[in-house]
Image (cartoon, rainbow, N blue to C red):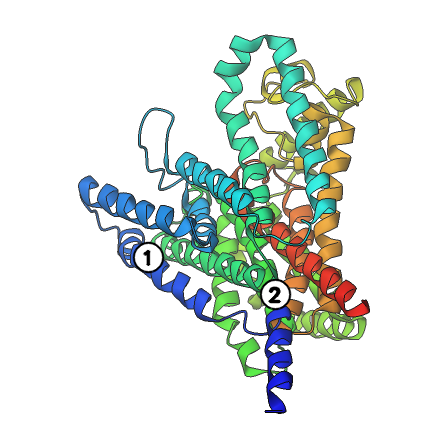
Amino acid sequence: MKSAPAETQAVAAADDDPAQGWAGPQLWSTLRLLAVPAAIALPVALFGLELPDVVLYGVALGFGAVLLFRMRRESETLLAVAVCYLPLSKSYVGPIAPGVNATNVLELMLLLALFWEALRNRQGQSSPRTDARLVALWGGLSVLSMVTETLRVGPSEFYSAHAETAKAWLDQFVVFYAFLHLIRDGKMARRVALYAMISSLFVLALGFVEWIDKRDIDSMERSRVLGPQLQPNDLGGYLAYSAGPFLGLLLCNLTRIRGWLLAPYFLMLVRVVVATFSRGAYLGLGLAAVCAAFFRGRVFFAVSALAMTVLISQFPSLIPESMMERLGQTTITSNQQDSFDKSAETRLTLWNAAIDMTLENPILGKGFGSFAGLKWKYTETTVEEADNHNMFLFISSQMGIPALVAFALVVLRMFQLGATLYRRCSDGFGRSVGLGGVAMAAAVIGVNMFGSRMVDICVSVEFWVYLAVLAVMWQQIRTSSAKAIQ
């Protein structure tokens, strides 16, 4: 009889501790449900099998009904479906009616789940306000740029030219706030991080199968792996972002067998990223690895860097020849003079144009989506490409320097949250999630130096989901610490 209170206290402590029992029945229940559409999608995606539309829409309708039924009592399944589907949304659009597709329906369901969550008011603790306000600032300034463009070109012209891209831009905020408020606690946050990792494995598998089909093509441009994002640079950006959690898991488990079980993943990752021939992805993935290793420990970083340098110097063939060829294309030699290749030269021209646009309107920018229509005023030669190939200049030229600062603060916030969780979490997986946030923030900086890879939710979904995960985990640590002090 005397042991009952102690046992009760132990159970209560385990319930309050997000490090205990997070991978329990709820995880397996969600994974079993996800296995149903996965069993249908895998053969279709990996082997090119075709199913009648009536079958596909029937399965989607039935699965949607199950989601609606489960949403009344829990939203975790919906979040798992969202994080798994959104990276595939460009390849598997799921058109339902003009202007309505599976992504729109999924976002409406997320908003409905938020409404039901507000009615239930199940979240006893305050939401992570710092992160919500910071992203709201970033979102508000970007929406202000849409107003600027509307005033410049008129409402009808803005709607016809930018309605689709504006909606795609707003997807990121819907996803972030839905995940931020629907993730109830640290245990659920850990499970959502795991769902995101599983989703990225599926995308990597699709890229690897495509690489197998294209590996014998002798043209670099035609052999580039597009992935479900249907664009090699977008695929490279997504894979660089999503590698962050796996880097965290590896570096936190280097002395355990479970850590080295990730070796096949990293071998496939490097192979597919190299096959995208995306210089931004190379930089982003490399920066993520360097930053995560440095943050784990300076001695570890120094030893790793020395070992890697010796290994590459002794065995230069370890660096894929196609990767060196792609990097070597940045400059070409003609008449004993070095110059940039056409792609790099175009980027420099567009960067200079974006800088001039920023200097003319540093506060509000030229307006959302204005770069494509105005770039001719700032380029000495005709440039066909509409994207300026740099996310930071993309923001400053069209939204203004304050918006650029807000975006940089959002990325910095992910780094800070990841670093804090890496130090403060008591469990190995929590520390891995934290270190993954550090790596992902670094990847975002690297990838977006050579492209605008934060404008489409099929590329950036991992970032926004992970930011929400980190915010909820940190909020629960703060709440638990406050209770312990009391």
The amino acid marked with disc number 1 is Ala
Q: Position of residue 355 (x, y in %)?
A: 75, 26
Image quarter hosting the N terminus? bottom right
Q: Which mark is residue 38?
A: 1
Left or right of residue 349: residue 119: left
Q: Position of residue 384 (x, y in %)?
A: 54, 22
Q: Residue at x 62, y 74 (%)?
A: 12
Count of number-bearing discs:
2
Mark 2 or 1, nearer chain start:
1
Nearest to the observer: residue 331 or residue 473: 473
Above or below for 35 versus 454: below
Q: Position of residue 232 (x, y in %)?
A: 48, 44
The amino acid marked with disc number 2 is Leu
The residue under label 2 is 247
Can residue 224 be seen here? The reply is no
Q: Position of residue 134 (x, y in %)?
A: 73, 40
**Where is residue 319, by image quadrant?**
bottom right
Q: Secondary structure at mark 1?
A: helix
The answer to the question of whether label 2 and label 1 lie on touching residues, with beta carbons closer than 8 A, is no
Q: Secondary structure at mark 2?
A: helix
Looking at the image, the residue that sits furthest to the front is 1
Left or right of residue 307: residue 315: left
Nearest to the observer: residue 2 or residue 251: 2
Q: Residue at x 61, y 13 (%)?
A: 150
**Where is residue 406, by image quadrant?**
top right
- Give the distance between the C-alpha atoms of the residues marked 2 and 1, in whole angstroms: 25 Å
**Where is residue 189, by image quadrant?**
bottom right
Question: Within 10 angstroms of label 1, few (less than 14), some, or many (20 or more) residues?
Answer: some
Nearest to the observer: residue 65 or residue 455: 65
Q: Residue at x 48, y 25 (%)?
A: 164
